[in-house]
Image (tube, coloured by chain):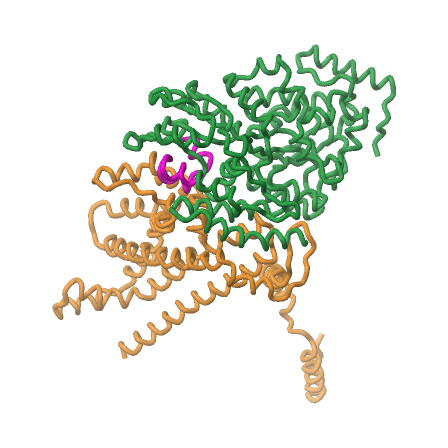
């Protein structure tokens, strides 16, 4: 067991060292904490490929300079990472100490299996936690993701993904269409902008089974939908779901490019960036490729706005990433320093400024100096901050999230070939109910 | 050391006791069997027994397995996605066997004749077979794209309206078979070409003397002689097609919806996305029986053909 008490001398030495790092050109990390306490330790980190995982890997050497802790990190594509993490964690001896998790898919699964270490004690320990990292600095949504039923923190909320509306200002101006604020206005705008003869479509979005759920749930939430009732029953065949599906079907069959049934975010984004689609609803994190003139024909011409309001409210479907420590790790303190570094102000600012994600910490979002450094258009940042105020979890917190997304997602895809929304949703509901019951019983 | 001067009776007695002792010993070669036996037990018998054991349990990764008897098997016929996936697998397999077989045979007949640059063209023809399926799948995905893909552009040159290819449920499987056919026709061509090369010249000469037309020569001389090769090609194609995963996964992931979801794809989702290993094991067992049945049917057909051949030549 390592000594965790801090003497005045080591504290001073640590502060001096971090101060020196600051002078030597390294970005400032909270100087009150002795980051070097676990120098010489080596930890393994398992990350998801994408702007967030890449950022941590890119600056891993900086973490080693700061703490003296060596980091072995593997970065794996999302789907494979989820499988690998679950299989290794089940074995009881995962090869990694730190794991990147997708809250919207894995929260309940990880909690029920008890795979992650409780960080509450570490967070209350001033010898391990910098004073600026406070629980109340995380947004409510982030804490909802990170805390279990007993209020224990089993991970640190890292990056949030809000759904927003991307709109092509040039196409809107050409047809004299205003930015829609409601679903009705959005449908009218999409129909007016739609011009298939010239290869221009009013709207584009995910149609591919499973992936399409993230778009649909934003419609569902704005029609007043709730995923679960008080008893934990799933509610995706009610009137709100049917209305949301009708809207989804109408937009994607009447005003979207042909073939959307097979579109994931990539195909949808391609349609927007090629100037073929006037509106797209998806996560905030796609702004960097949209604004990259080498990859996009519409760089500088895209507006960013909140998802239009539905009859029962205006929400932004929210998904999030966290970073946690495995229960089996023998280097939890060193791993905790890594997690703390990952969600630190410096790293959070870098994430936000590059447009790769949005930190859950309000001290980062509210910092003027950080906001000035954001490379995306100001409208993008406004839509991010605006979405934060109306954010709502985009998927139910259950174990069989993947089955849920597959079954209801397949129903949605079927409506794109003309199937009746109510019938398809009922069918999916009946298939999913026993799966949910079985998983809750286990 | 054997004493050559020992009495004969003593020697025979010695032999008798030897014989008795040997009968009670394991065969002298048994240590040589052990490595193979261990490998077979470890990589074939154990996984199979374990799969069957898992299929009899309700087991989600993360929770403890609980014995559930045949409940997983009972779930199969009521699981619409599974039933549909069986249909998709059979449809996909049938098309992926028949099309390369027909095209491959035609190509073999063509490449069996003499024409300039034959060797070069034959090499060119078998190139698709050498490419990595996932790389091929990604290139085809771009080619299939309804707005940006080259296939619709090519169709537009001959006045055919744009198609949705893998982006529509009704054409998804057929489009995937197109990729499969493009990649594996060369294999069938190679096998059949080998068959054609092994046919002796005499039957052709006598057929020509008897005044047979080219079609009659193909139907009554070439076809029966290359039939065994066609069966081998069909068998290899069938096994490959039925377990096809990479191309489908990379292009459609079983979509749109579940329109191109084969047993393999569904199995993958159940095991590694839903982590329901008990139910996935039950699917594997049924899938295995299906493959054995298909292979058995083909073998039976082949044997019958041999009987007819023997009868015909007798």
B121 left or right of A67? Answer: left
Question: For the view shown, which residue lies furthest in the front direction?
Answer: A311
- Pick whichever, B212 or B8, lies toward us: B212
B267 left or right of A113? Answer: left
Q: Please tell me whether the stretch drawn in magenta is mainly helix, strand or loop.
A: helix
Q: Position of residue B304 (x, y in %)?
A: 35, 74
The chain coloured green is A
Q: Position of residue A71 (x, y in %)?
A: 68, 30
Q: Quadrant of the N terminus of chain B?
A: bottom right
Residue at position x 47%, y 60% in the image = B83
Residue at position x 71%, y 14% in the image = A21
Looking at the rendering, which quadrant does residue A354 occupy?
top right
Q: Position of residue A47 (x, y in %)?
A: 61, 34
In the image, residue B46 sits, relative to residue B122, either above or below, namely: below
Q: Quadrant of the C terminus of chain B?
A: bottom left
Q: Position of residue B232 (x, y in %)?
A: 37, 62
- Pick whichever, A37 or A414, lies toward us: A414
Question: For the view shown, which residue lies furthest in the top direction?
Answer: A23
Residue at position x 55%, y 31% in the image = A315
A68 left or right of A9? Answer: left
In the image, residue B255 sits, relative to residue A320, either above or below, namely: below
The chain coloured orange is B
User: Which segment did they paint magenta?
Assistant: A248-270
């Amino acid at each position: 067991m390592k000594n965790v008490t801090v003497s005045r001398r080591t504290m001073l030495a640590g502060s001096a060292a971090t101060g020196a790092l600051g002078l030597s050109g390294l970005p400032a990390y909270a100087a009150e904490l002795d980051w070097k306490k676990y120098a010489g330790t080596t930890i393994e980190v398992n990350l998801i490929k994408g702007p967030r995982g890449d950022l941590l890997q890119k600056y891993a050497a900086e973490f080693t300079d700061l703490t003296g802790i060596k980091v072995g990190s593997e970065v794996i594509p999302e789907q494979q990472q989820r499988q690998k993490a679950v299989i290794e964690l089940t074995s009881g001896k995962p090869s990694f100490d730190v794991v990147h998790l997708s809250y919207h898919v894995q929260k309940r699964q990880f909690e029920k299996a008890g795979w992650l270490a409780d960080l509450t004690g570490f967070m209350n320990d001033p010898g391990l936690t910098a004073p600026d990292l406070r629980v109340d600095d995380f947004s409510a949504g982030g804490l909802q993701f990170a805390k279990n039923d007993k209020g224990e923190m089993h991970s640190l909320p890292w990056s949030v993904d809000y759904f927003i509306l991307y709109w092509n200002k040039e196409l809107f101006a050409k047809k004299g269409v205003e930015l829609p604020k409601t679903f009705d206005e959005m449908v009218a705008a999409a129909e007016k902008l739609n011009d298939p003869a010239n290869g221009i479509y009013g709207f584009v979005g995910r149609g591919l089974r499973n992936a399409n759920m993230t778009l649909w749930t934003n419609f569902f939430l704005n029609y007043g939908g709730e995923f679960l009732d008080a008893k934990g029953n799933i509610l995706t065949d009610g009137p709100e779901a049917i209305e949301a599906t009708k809207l989804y079907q109408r937009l994607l069959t009447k005003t979207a490019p042909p073939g959307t049934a097979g579109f994931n975010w990539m195909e949808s984004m391609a349609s927007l960036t090629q100037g073929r689609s006037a509106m797209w609803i998806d996560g905030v994190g796609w702004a960097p490729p949209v604004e990259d003139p080498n990859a996009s024909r519409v760089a500088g011409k895209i507006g960013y706005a909140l998802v239009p309001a539905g009859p029962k409210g205006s929400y932004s479907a929210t998904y999030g990433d966290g970073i946690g420590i495995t229960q089996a790790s023998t280097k939890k303190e060193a791993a905790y320093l890594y997690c703390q570094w990952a969600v630190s102000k410096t790293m959070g600012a870098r994430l936000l400024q590059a447009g790769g994600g949005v930190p859950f910490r309000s001290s980062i979002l509210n910092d003027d100096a950080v906001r000035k450094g954001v490379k995306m258009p100001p409208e993008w940042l406004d839509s991010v901050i605006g979405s934060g105020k109306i954010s709502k979890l985009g998927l139910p917190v259950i174990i069989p999230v993947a089955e849920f997304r597959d079954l209801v997602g397949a129903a949605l895809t079927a409506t794109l070939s003309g199937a009746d929304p109510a019938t398809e949703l009922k069918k999916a509901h009946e298939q999913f109910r026993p799966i949910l019951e079985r998983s809750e019983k286990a | 050391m054997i004493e050559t001067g020992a009495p004969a009776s003593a020697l025979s007695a010695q032999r008798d006791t030897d014989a008795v002792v040997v009968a009670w010993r394991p065969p002298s070669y048994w240590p040589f069997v052990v490595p193979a036996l261990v490998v077979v037990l470890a990589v074939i018998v154990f996984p199979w027994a374990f799969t069957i054991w898992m299929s009899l349990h309700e087991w989600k990764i993360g929770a403890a397995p609980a014995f559930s008897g045949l409940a997983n098997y009972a779930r199969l016929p009521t699981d619409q996605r599974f039933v549909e996936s069986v249909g998709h697998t059979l449809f996909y397999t049938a098309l992926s066997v028949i099309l390369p077989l027909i095209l491959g045979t035609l190509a073999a007949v063509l490449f069996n004749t003499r024409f300039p640059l034959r060797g070069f063209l034959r090499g060119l023809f078998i190139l698709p077979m050498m490419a990595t399926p996932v790389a091929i799948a990604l290139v085809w995905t771009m080619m299939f794209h309804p707005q940006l893909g080259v296939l619709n552009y090519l169709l537009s040159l001959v006045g055919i309206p744009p198609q949705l290819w893998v982006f529509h449920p009704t054409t998804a499987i057929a489009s995937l078979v197109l990729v499969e056919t493009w990649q594996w026709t060369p294999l069938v061509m190679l096998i059949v070409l080998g068959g054609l090369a092994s046919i002796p010249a005499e039957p052709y000469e006598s057929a020509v003397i008897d005044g047979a037309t080219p079609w009659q020569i193909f139907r009554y001389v070439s076809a029966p002689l290359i039939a065994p090769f066609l069966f081998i090609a069909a068998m290899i194609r069938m096994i490959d097609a039925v377990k096809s995963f990479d191309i489908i996964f990379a292009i459609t992931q079983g979509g749109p919806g579940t329109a191109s979801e084969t047993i393999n794809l569904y199995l993958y989702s159940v095991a590694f996305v839903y982590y329901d290993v008990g139910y996935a094991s039950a699917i594997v067992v049924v899938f295995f029986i299906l493959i054995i049945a298909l292979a058995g049917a083909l073998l039976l057909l082949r044997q019958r053909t041999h009987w007819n051949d023997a009868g015909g030549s007798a």
